[in-house]
Image: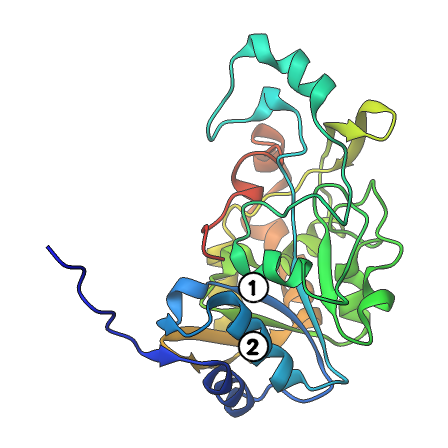
Amino acid sequence: MPTPPPTGPLVTRDTVAADLRELGVRPGETLLAHTSLSSLGWVCGGAVSLVQGLLDALGPTGTLVVPTQSGDLSDPAHWGDPPVPRAWWDTIRASMPSYDPLVTPSRGVGVVPETVRTWPGALRSAHPQTSFAAIGPRAGEILDGHATDCRLGERSPLARLEGLHARVLLLGAGYGTCTSFHLAEYRIASPLVELGRPGPAGWETVTEVSISSDRFDELGHDFERDRTVVRGKVGAADVRLFPVGDAVAYAERWLPLHRPREEEIQHPPPLSTSFERGDPHL
């Protein structure tokens, strides 16, 4: 039986740029983009056209930032989707390649961040599990100094983006993917967790703030109800646009009330579970 033709809409580089401009994306601004390619419709040129459309809307003085997480560089003891046999754990720890920003692929965040990561002139930050990649004149300013013991806190690109008054673009993606909310977790009473990962000198363990995207969809719903969020469409995709700083400030007040510290202690999510796994199209 023949495959039915796509139903569309037909999305191109030019329509992406035009829809973003209509939404209010400004030339020269900095965007932290979370994207779902499959939500747009039939995209002529796929992820490449989407990235080109984003860059066209931002212009030569704008900067595009995306998460390029590689949470699989983590302790196999905590893997659950899928797990691996306990007998393999020591071999995996001894054999796993350490992080290389030029070589290590992103994982669990989809084809668009990986396309940005490999784009000519793109830069990538230094954290081996929660890196960001960026294209544009402010890329170095945003990405430099990402501490390897600070996934998404004050010494990460998120804090730089907040200081630069960057905006978040959720393009077909939900609030569950909104990394800006994690910066708030570093500013409230959050437990610490020990994380294992491969390092340049072998297996290493670092102490980090425990982070989780649990209830971020609820947080986003309340944020959108109480704060100004620009909404529109790019192709068939629902799009939201809002300042990083607004999202962080709202989450700082919301999380202690709705996701108390005791809940996080009972369920400290390792990086290799839901945090680093998302829609494969993101």
Residue at (49, 27) in percent of width and height: 80
Alpha carbons under labels 2 and 1: distance apart: 11 Å
Residue at 56% x, 36% y is 263
Residue drawn at point x = 63 percent, y = 65 percent:
250
Percent coordinates x, y for residue 233 in the rendering: 42, 80
Of the residues tagged 2 and 1, which is closer to the observer? 1
Q: Where does the image place residue 239, in percent across and percent down from the top left?
A: 47, 75
Q: Residue at x 75, y 76 (%)?
A: 165
Indicate left or right for 72 with 152 as reference: left
Q: Secondary structure at mark 2?
A: strand
Whether tag 2 and tag 1 are in contact, CB under 8 A, the answer is: no
Q: Identify which amino acid the numbered label 2 is placed on.
A: Leu
Q: Residues within 10 Å of mark 2 (few under 14, many from 20)?
A: many
75 in relation to 117, above or below: above
Q: Residue tagged by mark 1?
A: 34
Q: Label 1 amino acid?
A: His
Q: Is residue 15 above or below residue 7?
A: below
- Residue that label 2 marks: 241
> Sequence order check: which comes first, mark 2 or mark 1?
1
Circle 1 packing at 10 Å, graded few (<14), some (14-19), many (20+), is many
**Relative depth, front residue between 101 and 274:** 101
